Image: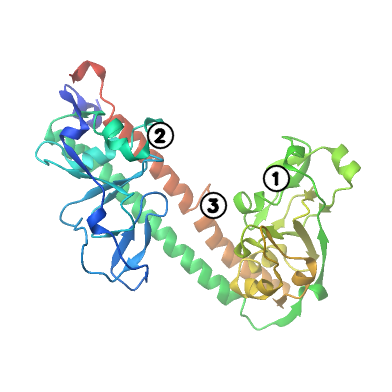
């Protein structure tokens, strides 16, 4: 019998409405007045949802002392909830808070972990009344305080490990960005891309043209969500007939596919080295760049501030931001020897694997730890029905 099995064996629990043990509050009296946020200030300003920390304020009045009394921040629209044990100000009273009524009966941290097991479909209807209509009446399984503490301890250990890995990933990404910028400030001939290679613009096709098998194809929208520094396989394909009928254009092995349109200026110019033996069809919102340079060297360069500072003035802004080949041709790139290009690529490859790889880097490790946490959370908070007592 495992430790967890023995922990839960013969555990008697009761089902009780959450509202008997937890209080609901809208943070009206903790609202921030100023929008003058600065990272040098001390107190974070919170909101519900993905953004969570909007910034930091120097206001000293009306701070919620979560360091003394932790709180659960939740969002009616997504059932997302976050554990907060640091002092804060709130952006608006639309943010919801759950606080403890009696820690001698039910730990708020136990409630927090249990809330994370609820399906997202729990919350429907009038979001202003979710505590009354859903949460406060929702019955929660209450084991002994001893069992609650042990469940919290186990889940805390997984959470802390994931947090440590996430912090390390953030630090490595900062290190990666720093070295990438420095490595492209090397002593070498500076040449415009127009002198060392040729650009080819793709031709238009639509998402409905994409199929699951056929001629390898890159749609410009996939450049932001699927492709990294290099690729030798594609997510999408088109038919040979479409290629022939529309005379679609193909990037060859060693070309760099550069995205030329996006919703923001920051989206423009990202490049992916195509290393597949077979050619790849490119969308008309992309260019392919062919040169004698190491393709990955060029792709890494398109991720630098040095590159984006040069193309920014050539980007047209509107509903969709875009750049044409004339703007890209003017970009100046350092051109060292092939050996030096390979050295730069070798260094940056190590950082890229560590910070981006979903098969062997930190993102993969974080994903595994998160799945492990969710697995044990669900085991610990899903009690066998034969030990439940109403």
Instruction: Mark 1 or mark 3: name the one nearer the start of the chain.
Output: 1
Q: Nearer the viewer, mark 3 or mark 2?
A: 2
Q: Which residue is mark 1?
A: 234
Q: Which residue occupies the extreme left position in the image?
A: 104
Q: Nearer the viewer, residue 34 or 15?
A: 34
Q: Which quadrant: the N terminus?
A: top left
Q: Which residue is mark 2?
A: 120
Mark 3 burial class by Cα count in 10 Å: few <14, some 14-19, many 20+: some
Q: Nearer the viewer, residue 90 or 367?
A: 90
Give the image quarter of residue 213. Answer: top right
Residue located 23% across and 31% down the image: 3
User: Which type of secondary structure does the marked residue at label 1 adopt?
Assistant: loop
Position of 145 compared to 83: left or right?
left
User: Which type of secondary structure does the marked residue at label 3 adopt?
Assistant: loop
Residue located 27% across and 31% down the image: 381
Whether residue 255 is visible to the viewer of this picture, yes or no, is: no
Give the image quarter of residue 330. Answer: bottom right
User: Which type of secondary structure does the marked residue at label 2 adopt?
Assistant: helix
Whether residue 91 is visible to the viewer of this picture, yes or no, is: yes
* Location of residue 386 with respect to 288 vertically, above or below: above
Instruction: Mark 1 or mark 2: name the one nearer the start of the chain.
Output: 2
Mark 1 burial class by Cα count in 10 Å: few <14, some 14-19, many 20+: some
Mark 2 burial class by Cα count in 10 Å: few <14, some 14-19, many 20+: few
Q: Nearer the viewer, residue 187 or 285?
A: 285
Instruction: Mark 3 or mark 2: name the one nearer the start of the chain.
Output: 2
Q: Which residue is mark 3?
A: 357
Spatial CA distance of label 1 from label 2 is: 33 Å
């Amino acid at each position: 019998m495992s430790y967890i099995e023995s922990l839960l064996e013969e555990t008697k629990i009761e089902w009780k409405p959450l509202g008997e043990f937890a209080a609901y509050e809208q943070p009206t009296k903790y609202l921030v007045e100023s929008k003058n946020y600065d990272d040098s200030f001390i107190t974070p300003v919170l909101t519900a949802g993905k953004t969570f920390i909007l910034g930091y304020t120097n206001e000293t009045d009306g701070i919620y002392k979560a360091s003394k009394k932790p709180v659960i921040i939740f969002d009616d629209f997504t059932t997302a909830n976050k554990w907060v044990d640091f002092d804060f100000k709130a952006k608006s009273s639309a943010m919801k808070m759950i606080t403890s009524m009696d820690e001698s009966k039910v730990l708020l941290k136990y409630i927090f972990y249990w809330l994370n097991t609820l399906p997202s479909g729990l919350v429907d209807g009038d979001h202003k009344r979710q505590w009354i209509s859903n949460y406060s009446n929702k019955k929660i399984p209450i084991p002994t305080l001893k069992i609650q503490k042990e469940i919290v301890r186990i889940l805390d250990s997984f959470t802390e490990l994931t947090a440590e890995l996430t912090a390390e990933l953030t630090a490595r990404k900062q290190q990666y960005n720093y070295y990438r910028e420095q490595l492209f400030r090397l002593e070498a001939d500076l040449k415009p891309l127009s002198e060392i290679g040729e650009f080819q613009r793709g031709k238009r096709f639509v998402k409905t043209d994409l199929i699951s098998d056929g001629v390898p194809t890159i749609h410009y929208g996939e450049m932001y969500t699927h492709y990294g520094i290099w690729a030798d396989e594609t997510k999408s394909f088109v038919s040979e007939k479409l290629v022939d009928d529309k005379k679609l254009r193909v990037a060859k092995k060693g070309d760099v596919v550069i995205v030329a349109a996006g919703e923001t200026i920051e989206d423009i110019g990202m490049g992916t080295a195509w290393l597949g033996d077979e050619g790849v069809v490119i969308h008309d919102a992309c260019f392919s760049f062919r040169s004698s340079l190491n393709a990955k060297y060029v792709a890494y360069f398109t991720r630098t501030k040095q590159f984006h500072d040069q193309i920014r003035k050539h980007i047209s802004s509107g509903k969709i931001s875009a750049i044409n080949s004339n703007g890209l041709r003017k970009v100046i790139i350092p051109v060292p020897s092939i050996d030096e290009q390979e050295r730069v690529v070798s260094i940056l490859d190590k950082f890229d694997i560590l910070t981006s790889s979903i098969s062997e880097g930190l993102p993969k490790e974080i994903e595994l730890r998160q799945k492990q946490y969710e697995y044990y959370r669900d085991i610990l908070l899903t009690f066998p029905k034969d030990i439940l007592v109403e």
